[in-house]
Amino acid sequence: MDILLSRRATGDIEQMDYPDCDPRLLDNTYRQFGIINRALSGWRRLYNRELRNLKRQGQAPLTVLDIGCGGGDLAVMLAGWAARDGMPMQITGIDPDPRAASFARRRRSVPGVAFRQAHSGELVREGAAFDVVISNHMLHHLAPEELRQLLADSEILASRKALHNDLVRSPTAFALFSVAALPFRRSFIRQDGLTSIRRSYRPAELAAAAPPGWSVERAWAFHQVLTYRKG
C-alpha cells in the first residue's frame, strides 16, 4: 500500500458496496454511521454555518435534499438540530441502493424527514427543487462521469446552494481513524472507512475534478466541502 497516500486508490472497493455482502454487518454499519457522523463528519458546524441562518419565504420550511443518504442518520440529525432551533425544515433523503433505502425507511418516524429509493437524476426529471442539496462522504465513491452527473443534477435541484461534504485523503487521517475505529466491531466501519480515506480526494484534486462554479472550502478536520452557491 502507498503509505503516503500520494494517489487515490480508485480501484479499491468498500465491502458494503458489494451486493452480496453480509446483511447483518451491513445493518450494523448503517446503525454505527450515526455515531461516526455525529463525532467526525463536522455537520454540526456546517449546519450552524450554512443552514441555520438561511432566510425563508414567510413560514415555509427550508427544504433540503440529502443525496446518497445511506441509513438516514444525517437527515435525522439535521431535523433534530432544526427543531431545537425552532427552524422549520423539510428533509428528503434519497439513495439508489435498495438496502440503504429500506434501512432508512425502517427508522423511527421523525417529523420533517422522508426517505425514498431514488437517484438524483430521477428528481431532476420530476422537476423537483430544494433550497439546499447536500451529501456526506459520497464523492469518493463516484467514477468521474458519475461525479460530473451528480454536480450537474445538484445545480438543477438546488435553488440556493449545494454542499457535498467529503473526506480529505491524508496519512494522518488514515492512522487516526485506524485506531479510533477499533471499537466498531461486527460491521464494515473500520475496513470501509480506511478504504474511503484511500479513495478520497485532496483539495486540489477535487477542485480540478469539479466544473466551473464549484469551489472547495475548508471544513471540519480532514474534511472538505465542494460547494455551489447561487446568486
Image: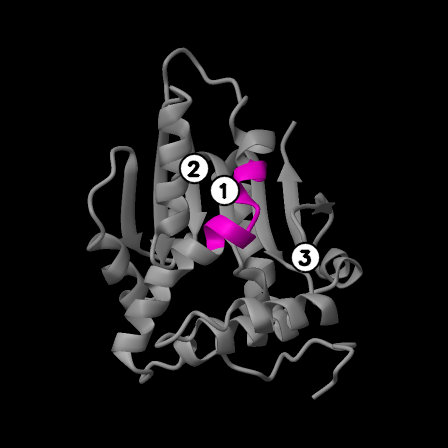
**Residue 154 visible at all:** yes
- Give the x, y percent position of residue 46: 58, 38
Calculate the distance from the C-alpha at mark 2 to the C-alpha at mark 3. 24 Å
Q: Give SS at disc 1.
A: strand
What residue sits 39% from the left and 82% below the top?
18
Q: Give SS at disc 2.
A: strand
**Residue 69 visible at all:** no
**175 sits left or right of 157 in the view:** right
Do the residues bearing badges 1 and 2 touch, measured as CB atoms within 8 Å? yes
**4 sits left or right of 214 in the view:** right
Upstream in sequence: badge 2 or badge 3: 2
Q: Quadrant of residue 202 in the image?
A: bottom right
Q: Give SS at disc 3.
A: loop
Calculate the distance from the C-alpha at mark 3 to the C-alpha at mark 1. 21 Å
- Give the x, y percent position of residue 17: 42, 76
Numbered range of the magenta stretch:
37-46
Labels in figure, total? 3
Q: Residue tagged by mark 1? A: 133
What residue sits 58% from the left and 44% below the top?
163
Identified by mark 2, the residue type is Val
Q: Nearer the viewer, mark 2 or mark 3?
A: 3
Up-down relation of residue 12 to residue 172 (above or below): below
